[in-house]
Each structure stands twice: as structure tokens, then as C-alpha cells.
Image (tube, coloured by chain):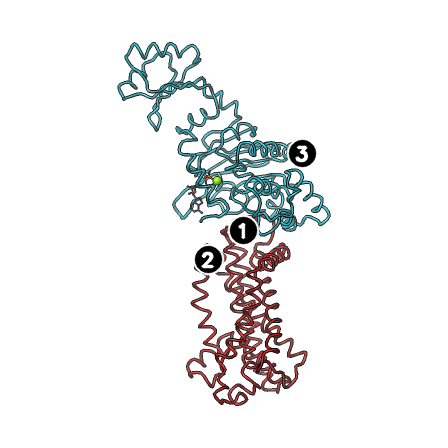
Amino acid sequence: MDNSIEIESLTKVYNGKFKAVDDVSLKIGRGKIYGLLGQNGAGKTTLIKMLTGVIKPTSGTAMIAGLDLNKDALKIRRITGVVPQEYTTDGDLSGKENLKLVADLYDVPRKDAEERIETLLRMVDLYDVKDRYASAYSGGMRKRLELVCGLMNTPEVLFLDEPTLGLDVTTRENLWSYIRSFEREFHITIILTSHYLDEVDSLANELSIMDHGKIIVSGTSSDLKKSLKGDTITLKLKNDDEFKIVQNFKEAIEVKKMELGDIRIKVNNSDVVLPELMKYLSDHKISPQSINVRKPSLDEVFIEYTGRNINAEQSGKDYEKLMTMGRGAK
Amino acid sequence: MSGLIPLTIRDLKRWYRNPVSAVVGVIQPIFWIVLFGSAFDITRFGVSSTTFFEGAPDYITYLMGGILTIIGLFTGMFSGVNIIWDRRLGILQRFLIAPINRASIVFSRILSSVARISVQIMILFAVAFVIPNGLKIVNGFTLMDGVILVSAVFMVSFIFSSFFSILAVRMTRMESVFGIVNLINLPLMFASYAMFPPDLMAPWLSHVAKYNPVSWSAQSIRMVLIHGTLTASEAHTVLIYMLGLLALALFMLVITYIISNREIRE
Ligand SMILES: Nc1ncnc2c1ncn2[C@@H]1O[C@H](COP(=O)(O)OP(=O)(O)OP(=O)(O)O)[C@@H](O)[C@H]1O
Ligand SMILES: [Mg+2]
């Protein structure tokens, strides 16, 4: 088996009408870190919940490590580790007790469990606070505890749903290095969802962009960047007449108007083309409100394929999510 | 049932570590016995307890069967409340992810409720013996009596714990459970022989109470506490009640298993 996970036409319809995940098919290779990138509400968590047996798919299926999601649910749960988006540790138990509970739920033999708990706690620097109640952990500590809960059964496949949501930069980078070391040390397949481009870019060997429940595009980060075929110049113009003039700019490979009114111009080599564009604009008496030049990046990939900027209207939502995190406001 | 023991232990840990719930759990049975024991004690108006309360030496001795049963009824609702609590905190997801029999998520709650109830019962007995005009065992207490008492309380606790747990399998709101508790607990308590014998009740009420499992448990416990060794006809009555409780408990066991295994959601 080359593929650790094969998803076939997985679909989830909520309340009989809303398609949160829409006919997703995907093959994920063994021993890789695979990123699922998408905005809030793209359907990442719903997809993960189906793959981990928390909710039932409306239709479709998946094979995980050779096991059928619709037939071998229990076996799949035995060999997968999950770190859900929300807190799932018990605040009224200590860090160590939480891990012990998870070990018991996975039938880890007592002696192995003791050893593994200590190793894992040390690995994420929680050994010194192991006897403190989880409710008294800071956000980053709690998230680290969640991470190792997902490793307690030494899984073949690990699902990480937004593992660094709402953490500060240092803590995030810290967690990234833990995640990389999990992959190196345990040779497991990791599926990681995120709406942080840098996170997916730096961790994932391969990724898919998800939008409105669908997979829009998949590939390695560098392949996706190459697929952009050049640099992007973004302009803010005053009116549609100006847009029509810019459309006739000869060096442009493509000129597109975005949802928020920005004009995106695809060019081969912005270093050479930009001066020409400036001249063209001034010849036509157009003075743009802003100009922005970007080399291929995951950001650009996201905008190219979804027509939206991933970080637009994001920060407010992040804050909201933080405030309700762990409270499962349903 | 995989997962049952660790989940039960976790639930009990949360209980005894929480000073409020532990203290409430201890004080509650004392309140019941002291308050109900004097509020409903009509023997102080010269009513003879032996005549009106089925031969009981005093009202509290009569009331014990009722109180033991009601503790089962009221503590049972917590198993439902706690499942919803776990759901709202997100902890339930951790259990749904784990390779356990999902019924154990619910049964651990029921088991720990039953365990808590056992503790409360021991406290209740201790208090009932100590207070003035309290519990008096006049006709002896055999091993058989003990078995009947304990199994009646366990069965009734199990029945109500599982009832409230089934409700919680899909609910997301705490208020819903409390609403249902308010709706059914008091009627279940008053439309039963928990407080008063059939002769002191309105005829229609006493007729309804006959079919109430609270009555079955209360009557069985009370008969063994008051009479010690039972006559053949008393034993027959107790046997019928106990079989009724057993049938209901088994029914709840099967239903709870099926529903919790299939229907529990995050
Ligand atoms: N239980 C539910 N009932 C109805 N709709 C739901 C439910 N859970 C999620 N949804 C909807 O499904 C869509 C996808 O949600 P999902 O949580 O999978 O998104 P996500 O990609 O994980 O987003 P985020 O980045 O915010 O975590 C959203 O529009 C959400 O409102
Ligand atoms: Mg999500």
C-alpha cells in the first residue's frame, strides 16, 4: 500500500441541506505531512471528523491504512491519533491523569503507559507541571497536552486540526518543531488542517486547498507556486474604464478583477514588466491608488484558486474562535 | 465493555474532588430524612404509626424506603447532566475518537451514579439511626432483607440514571434535562407510596401509584425494614415488586445499550 489514506467522494450534508463537505476525493501518501488549507467554514474540521469516526458521512467512504471507514471504524480508531480543534482534555484532571485516561481508553498496558506518559510529557516540556490540573495550564501548555494525547497510542495516522490556532508566534514555531519530530521519530502520516499559510508551507510535504467543502487544488507547495506561471501585480483603480484600459496592457498574461475590486495582473517577470506598466499607466493618465508586486507564494496560490485572500476578515474570527474555544458553543 | 472502568474512575474522581458536589451529596440525604421526617410526620397529631404506617414503629422508619428510593431518583439525573456537560466542554469528542464501546460512555455515568448513591445511602442510614424518633429495627434484619434493600435501591437508581442518560445521548442543552427533571421527578415522588401508604391517599392517586416503580422499591424496602422476617404473603408482594423492578431495569439496560451505542453524538 502506497497510500495511507484514500478518500472517495466523501460528502457531509448538515440538516439535510447544507453541504459542508462536497464530494471530496484525495490520496495521501504514507509517512508524509499533508496539509489541508482553507478558510473558516471551508469544511476542514467536518472532513477530519468524518475520517476519525466522530460523525457519519452522508455518502462516500475512505480507506485509512487499508481499513474501510464504513466497515472497520473501531480498528481505524485504534491506529489513529487525533488532536481535535477544540480542547478535549479534562480540566478537572491533571496533565498526567489526562494522559493516563487516554492510555486506558486505548488499552495501553500499564507498564508501557507509565513509560510513554513520561516520554511524551518530557517531549513537550510538561513534565514539571504534570500534576497540575489541566484547567490551570496556559493555552500553549494545554495545546501541547492535546498534542501528546493524540500520540498516546503510537498511531499510524495522526490528525491535527488547527494545532496552533490562537497561539503566539514562538509557541507556534515550538509546536511545529514537535510536529516535525513526531513525523521523523514515529514515521507516521500526519494530516494537518490550518488556515495559516506559513504553517502549511513550512510543515506540509503536500497540500490541498479546500473551499466551500470542495478540494480546489492539490500538490506540493512548490508545484502549486510554479502553477501560477509568474508574478502578480495587484492594482487598486478608480473605475471600470481604467480596468478596461489595463486589460489592453500587452505584457500582461492575464488581467482579473477580484471580489474586493482589486485588479490582478499576471506577468512573466515583474522586475522587467513593472517599469513598463508604470509607463503604460501614466501614458493613459491612470494613477492607481495602490500597487503591489508579489512573487509566487502560497498566499498567491490561494488567491489564484479561490478568488479570495485567505486572511481577509480573518483576524476578527480568530478572536471569536479563541473566546469560544473549548466551550464547544453549539 | 471496553472503556467502562477508566471512564467510571474518571467520573468518580471528578465527584470526590469537587468539594461542592461531595458536600452536597453528603448533606442531601440528611436534609431529606430530617426535613421529610418531620414535615410529613402526622403521628404527632396522635395518629398511630402502627395502624396507619403498616406497623412501623415511627414515621421515619416508614419513610426510609421512600427516601432511599428518591435519592436514587434524584441522583440519577446527574448522569444525564454530566454527559451533556462533557459534550459542551468538548471532552466527549476524546471518548468518541477512542476505540471503546461507545455505550461505556453512558454506562460509566450510570455506574458512577450508582456508586455515589451507595455512599449517600450509608450516610442516610447512619443519620437515621442517630436522630431522635429515627429508624428503629424492631423485628430483626436478615441477610435476605439486606439483599432486597440493596438490590431495590440499585435497580431503582439504575433505572432512573439510564432514563436520564438516554435523554442526554443527543441533547446539547443542560436546561432540557433540568426541565424534564422538574417535570417528572415530583410527580413520580408524590404519585407513589414513597411518603404515604395507599390508605392515606386519594383513591385515584393510590391506583396510579401502584404502577410507579418508585412505589415498588419504596414498598419492598419498607417491608423488610419494618417486618424483618416476611410472612408468605408479604414475601409474595415483595417478590412481585422486585421482579417488576428487575424487568424494568433489564429493559432499560438493553435500550440504553442500543441507543447509546448507535446514537451518541459529539
Ligand atoms: N454540527 C453542524 N451543524 C450544521 N452545520 C455545521 C455543523 N458543523 C459545521 N457546520 C458548518 O459546516 C461548515 C464547515 O465547518 P467546519 O467546521 O468543517 O469548517 P472548518 O474548515 O473547520 O473551519 P474553521 O477554520 O473555522 O475551523 C461551516 O459552514 C459550518 O457552519
Ligand atoms: Mg475547523
Q: Nearer the viewer, residue A174 or B72?
A: A174
Measured Cα–Cα span from mark 2 to mark 1? 15 Å
Would residue A252 appear left or right of A225 to someone viewing this image? left
Q: Is residue B59 above or below residue B106?
A: below
Q: Quadrant of the N terminus of chain A?
A: top right
Q: Report which quarter residue B254 is drawn in.
A: bottom right
Q: Position of residue B56 (x, y in %)?
A: 56, 85
Q: Which chain is cyan?
A: A
Q: Report which quarter residue A216 is drawn in.
A: top left
The residue type indicated by label 3 comes to: Glu
Please give the name of the residue rendered at 57% of the width and 57% of the height, measured from the top-left corner.
B103
For disc 2, does the CB lie below 8 Å from ligand 1?
no
Measured Cα–Cα span from mark 3 to mark 2? 44 Å
Identify the mark at residue A40; answer none if there is no mark: none
Q: Position of residue A213 (x, y in %)?
A: 44, 37
Q: Colour of chain B?
A: red
Q: Which residue is mark 1?
A: B92
Q: Which residue is mark 2?
A: B174
The residue type indicated by label 1 comes to: Leu
Q: Position of residue B207 (x, y in %)?
A: 45, 81
Q: Nearer the viewer, residue A117 or B192?
A: A117
Q: Nearer the viewer, residue A7 or A151?
A: A151
The crowding category of the residue bearing disc 2, from other C-alpha atoms within 10 Å (few below 14, some 14 to 19, many at least 20), is: some
Q: Is residue A211 above or below residue A287?
A: below
Identify the mark at residue A185; answer none if there is no mark: 3
